[in-house]
Amino acid sequence: MSNMPIRRFCLVAVLLVTASTLVNAGGQSSPPRHPQADAQALDLARRAIALRSVRGPGNQTIKVAELFRDALVAGGFAVPDISITPVDDTAFMVARWRGSDPSLKPLVISGHLDVVEAKAADWQRDPFTPVVENGYLYGRGASDMKFDGALAIAALIEMKRAGFAPRRDVVIEFSGDEETDMKTSAMIAEQLKGADLVVNIDGGGGTLDETTGKPRYFTWQGAEKTYADFELSVTNPGGHSSQPRADSAISQLARGLLKIGAYRFTPELNDISRAYFVKAAQYEKPEIAAAMKAFAANPADRNAIETLAADPAHVGQIGTTCVATMIAGGHAQNALPQRATANINCRIFPGHKPADILAELSRVIGDPAVHVQDVTEGSVANDASPIRADFVSAVEAAMALAYPGVPVFPSMASGASDSMWFRYHGVPSYGASPVFIKSSDDFSHGLNERIPVANIAPGITYYVSLLGALAK
Ligand SMILES: [Zn+2]
């Protein structure tokens, strides 16, 4: 322990030069105002990426938890206030910075330690050997979400170093299986369901202009769609294929699938998606922009619905969608099918119960021979979070410091995150990562994942401001 900080400092000094040079060369942000935190963020991100926190044999998720815990302890967190809980082959971490007023509900910062599997043979570089090159940090977890975790930890330590004293408890927690079955995510949310507000550092974010590389806008995520899988099944006594029956499991299933394929759920809006359409319209092509504004004003506008429904980038924003994703049936080439099944994957608009969507699908199919069953795993229904004024003003102030003049507005995600588990308990949760990337650079879950290191200095500035305001 005694020799380590000195060795680490040397490494950090070298990294700091690299990071600040790149920040200045990019011209996107002012010089770092928190040099120690900036250097620590990059150092922690690299160390975390080097740990293969992938589900299955050799899962090093607990090592990432230990890395983060050690950094927090070295930064002044009390050892008894940090717990690492092993669960199956993974682990989760919860660390608490005690506030001066124990009667206040805690502020929770939520992230995850695990990453999606990466096959080294398919990558240009080894996914678990972090490399900084041409202004990017490369490696599995660079964008989802070890870099974000490192930024938040370095920012909290910077706040401690600066003598900040929170009024409410600040809890930073990392789940260990967000990318797979979310068992630890559910456990953490159960433990922290008395929280005042959750800042999910694995959601939201900024967009960089594809040509200039300059920040265009930032969105915080206040809602996400509910994931659901429904199995359609038809069973039949079957028989010899030389003696066809009037009813066939495959034909009945096919008729049901065609009806679902042609069906559209009633388009709808909530406060989050309305604000998104109004603000985001200015960044779209004229036809899409007009449809977004018209839909925000009237979600029954036929032309607007047609335009948005035809655009894969927006069809998920205007209502529930359900689509057949898998099909199986029959057991022999010369036999009548005894069974045919299909999976219907739904992304349910916030506020609806999966049971209601199941009932609607059954009505659409209109055939009692087609049995519909909810087979969803690892997901719970959740509503949109309210647009809370204290959060909105804190996030706008933090962005104004980090990226002056960049527009800030809410968004709704079509994928699931750990926010779902908190929203299920009625705790407002907001995706609010300060990381800006070009859409063409978004390789989360994919090959050659990378993140611009120019995000570090403004990211620290943002977190210090945001978390300071929310913890006061
Ligand atoms: Zn993630």
Image (cartoon, rainbow, N blue to C red):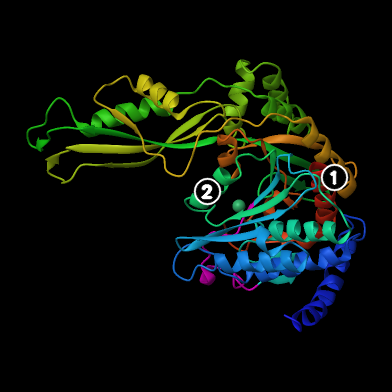
Does mark 1's beta carbon lie closer than 8 Å to ligand 1? Answer: no
Kind of element beneath mark 1? helix
Q: Quadrant of residue 78?
A: bottom right
The residue to which callout 2 is attached is 187
Give the answer, above or below, for where 9 lies relative to 66: below
Give neighbour class at mark 2: few <14, some 14-19, many 20+ (Cα, 10 Å).
Answer: some
Which percent across, then down, holds residue 99?
Answer: 77, 48
**Looking at the image, is mark 2 or mark 1 earlier in the sequence?**
2
Comparing 66 with 146, the one in front is 66
Give neighbour class at mark 1: few <14, some 14-19, many 20+ (Cα, 10 Å).
Answer: many
Instruction: Locate residue 315 relative to residue 373 in the image: left or right.
Output: right
Cα separation, mark 2 vs mark 1, equals 30 Å
Instruction: Locate residue 94 relative to residue 228 in the image: left or right.
Output: right
| Quadrant placement of the N terminus | bottom right
Which percent across, then down, holds residue 194?
Answer: 63, 39
| Quadrant placement of the C terminus | top right
- Can residue 405 be seen in this snapshot? yes
Q: Quadrant of residue 236?
A: top left
Main secondary structure type of the part rendered in magenta: loop
Which percent across, then down, holds residue 136?
Answer: 74, 64
Comparing 21 with 162, the one in front is 162
The residue to which callout 1 is attached is 398
Give the answer, above or below, for where 13 lies relative to 27: below
Comparing 96 with 110, the one in front is 96
**Residue at position x 62%, y 61% in the image:** 141
What's the amino acid at mark 2? Answer: Met
Comparing 436 with 73, the one in front is 73
Q: Which residues are magenta?
A: 111-129
